[in-house]
Amino acid sequence: MRIIEAAQITEAVAQLAIKANYYLNPDLYEALVKGREMEESPIGKEIFEILIKNAEIAREEEMAICQDTGMAVVFMEIGQDVHIVGGNLEDAVNAGVAKGYLEGYLRKSVVEEPLFNRVNTKNNTPAVIHVSIVPGDKVKIVLAPKGFGSENMSALRMFKPSDGIEAIKKFVVDTVVNAGSNPCPPIVIGIGIGGTMEKAALLAKKALIRPLNIRNSHPQYAALEQELLELVNNTGIGPQGLGGRITALAVNIEWFPTHIAGLPVAININCHATRHAEIEL
Amino acid sequence: MKEPIRITLPLTEEKVRSLKAGDSVLITGVVYTGRDAAHKRMVEALDRGEELPTDLKDQVIYYVGPTPAKPGKPIGSAGPTTSGRMDAYTPRLLEKGLRGMIGKGYRSPEVIEAIKKYGAVYFVAIGGAAALIAKSIKSYEVIAYEDLGPEAHAKIYVEDFPAIVAIDCEGNNIYEIGPKKYKR
């Protein structure tokens, strides 16, 4: 049994919050450079140029890539041979989010209750936390700040198995067209297929943290990712919705077995600043 | 790509008339900030027959909710927020002389009509380019609604703030023209 202090988790989460918001991951940066080359629209090319410069300035000056520093989504894989002491896990994670958002000069964007009393909690907590127990004695933490310009454009539909692949393709393209300029294209599209309603949504979110240059290991899903990327880019929406060839940088699909009667599909859209940072304790 | 057009504020109707949808611009001068809550208060003040906290004639409003400023900096990361949330209030402010808005995303038909009617312009800044935009903001001074925190109504001075003309005074809209051109 390995012992990990809750305070260690708090500190790790605080550092991840800052890191994720300041530094764009290399796969995203490379996708922007490639996008600048491939984009045909002059305004679109200029937008790519600005986004690349923006990521460089944020890195050099250690400031947030985007002013919407998001709601913190935290994925944790906890080894079953780990014992956390000195506090409970959820509090430790939230304390880390509060610390990171305060010390990193990140915007606090969370309200304490969604419908009747939308008062800012002033420390960006609570985080949305997903925990899975895995073999081993390590703790892996991924923190993905999620901006809501793009989160608001996400969608979920429970298809009938007979609806087939064409209906899913149409759903994806329609969702992207409906989103238009709102999610700050060029976007990254995470798609979850299968499981139950909430499993599909979670898969879609997880798909967003997979590197953009790695396709699904299942060849048919990999081919579908490529085809959807082409369909989405043929909409002409382009960078910032001002018209162009690159509406999305990548489509990532994650799938899970499902019920004989069902075919859930969730689409989670992210902006060009698809941010996440991870650590293993 | 054409060289960007340099604009100095205040923004007269004559300057607006020379701008066309799709033009790249670099804006220099005093700009006012405001998001949903500040807009709501401004329009409520007008409804009560009161004056606005500042005379908006020939002025430009930037829709922004920045991150907190680090010590020694005027502002934190400061990219545009979605303009559509301001649509309900915008025609009233254009009527009071507001000449331009900077934000991101689509505007309602009512806003586009008001842009045409009053000879105004809608610029878009690049969503997410918040660190780069912050570099063009040289000062930040709250002028009203301080209790709104980062969403307060503030006066900022910008130098070479990069933006694109999205809707010009004739109602030409890059969000309609652009995607049509590249659709396959």
Image (cartoon, rainbow, N blue to C red):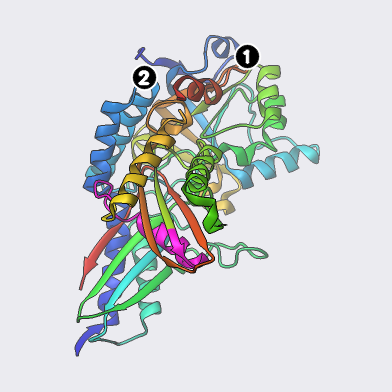
Question: Is residue B68 something one can see in this rendering?
Answer: no
The subunit carrying tag 2 is: A
Q: Residue A221 placed where, x, y %? A: 34, 51
What's the residue type where badge 1 is placed?
Glu
Q: Residue B176 placed where, x, y %? A: 55, 24
Q: Residue B77 placed where, x, y %? A: 38, 44
Label 1 belongs to which residue? B170
Label 1: few (<14), some (14–19) or many (≥20) C-alpha neighbours in 10 Å: some
Describe the element under mark 2 as helix, strand or loop: helix
User: Magenta segment: does it hold A214?
Assistant: yes
Describe the element under mark 1 as helix, strand or loop: loop
Question: Is residue A142 something one can see in this rendering?
Answer: yes
What's the residue type where badge 2 is placed?
Pro
Q: Which residues are magenta?
A: A193-215
Q: Considering depth in this image, is B98 or A226 the residue closer to the camera?
A: A226
Q: Considering depth in this image, is A184 or B48 the residue closer to the camera?
A: A184
**Going by the image, does B103 lie left or right of A255?**
right
For residue A129, above or below residue A174: below
Task: Tell how many labels.
Answer: 2
